[in-house]
Image (cartoon, rainbow, N blue to C red):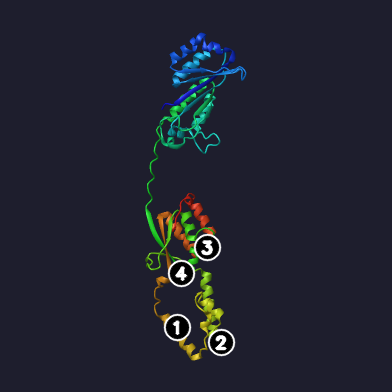
Amino acid sequence: MSVAGFKLTLWIPVEQVGIVIGRSGQTINKIQGGTSSRLNVVPDQDASAWAPVYIRGAPDGVFAAAQQVVELVDEIDDCVAEFHLGGRGRTLLRDENSGPSNLTLETKKVSADHKVRILIPQATGNAKSDNKPSKDDAAPCSLEGPLEGVKKALKALVEIASRKVEKKPQEPQVPQVEKCVSVPATRLRTVARRGQQQPVYRVVARYSGTQVAKRPRDQPIPEDAIVAREPEDALSQAALTVESVVEACTEEPTKITSSVISHVLPDENIDNDDFEDPGCSEDESSTETDASDEDDDEEVPAEPSKDRIGFMVRGGEKNVDAACQALVQIVEGSSVKDVVAQLKVAFPTAASRRGGR
């Protein structure tokens, strides 16, 4: 790789500017003709004791001209080299996460080895993907330090920027699997309720690296679906409620209180006033008891699909198993915070992905 717009600036003592120029410009013209470079000396005795000498051209010719200037004067100050690199070359020399310098470790090593300060601005516009140096791509790169150090550092940086970027081999795609989790309709709000940002099942999808979607109710739940049960405390509470209803019918058959009915049938659309019962006799109670005994002897039919909601989980097998287990745990009473914490440990990089619909 070559560089474009190369310019080297030397500082020489003001009183020795005439030596570099020579009588009628003979010396400076000789240097320019022998090195195919262009020199420009700008003396300013009032501004500084040092006068800048600007040398432009190809790097080899510029350094040859600079060496001849060094041989004519007693001493020189540190020099500055400015040049342009293509966007891809700059990318190989820069690292946005390396601190204020934004240089790669290899570029920093070049700076330390040759005692040169290196500045590589970021490419802009179309030059980001261009490998050809251009004067219009961005601010010029610069090297500042001793002449010999700048020369060696430039050579090292050009070698680094000329390397071909090796494409990373694509990781093999993980086989995708899909499983269904069957959730009781009474526990739907446990996984589908909206929190501060999104429903719980989407949080599970995010931290497990899967996609989770609620299955339409008109579609049957697969037979191999993973079944989430009601929490044990909810089942025991329901049993106690049924016992209280039986006691209410036996001891005070005049009326079933609306508070009991609301526990047995927690449907917001049902009016409790509709459940006033003028009473039931002992014969009716015994008849109902006999009927219930007969029902116990019969085979219990399968749970209607409308009483359960399916959630489809898709992704890698390990991720899907973890997501299904997380949904089951949450439905059965586990803390969402604890379950998500387990997913974060098992899949630390999955949070950057988004799942669920």
Lateral position of residue 196 relative to residue 166, left or right: right
Which amino acid lies under the numbered mark 4 shown in the image of this protein?
Ala
The earlier-in-sequence mark between 3 and 2 is 2
The earlier-in-sequence mark between 1 and 4 is 4
Q: Which residue is mark 2?
A: 251
Q: CA distance from mark 1 to mark 4?
A: 25 Å
- CB atoms of marks 2 and 4 within 8 Å: no
Q: Judge the density around disc 2: few (<14), some (14-19), many (≥20) Cα neighbours within 10 Å.
A: few
* Residue located at (40% from left, 80% from top): 298
**Circle 1 — which element?**
helix
Give the number of the disc on residue 185.
4
Q: Position of residue 330 (x, y in %)?
A: 50, 63
Give the number of the disc on residue 292.
1
The earlier-in-sequence mark between 2 and 1 is 2
Which amino acid lies under the numbered mark 3 shown in the image of this protein?
Ser
Residue 193 versus residue 74 in the image, above or below: below
Q: Judge the density around disc 3: few (<14), some (14-19), many (≥20) Cα neighbours within 10 Å.
A: some
* Residue 243 visible in the displayed image: no
Q: Which residue is mark 3?
A: 334
Which amino acid lies under the numbered mark 1 shown in the image of this protein?
Ser
Which amino acid lies under the numbered mark 2 shown in the image of this protein?
Glu
- CB atoms of marks 2 and 1 within 8 Å: no
**Circle 3 — which element?**
loop
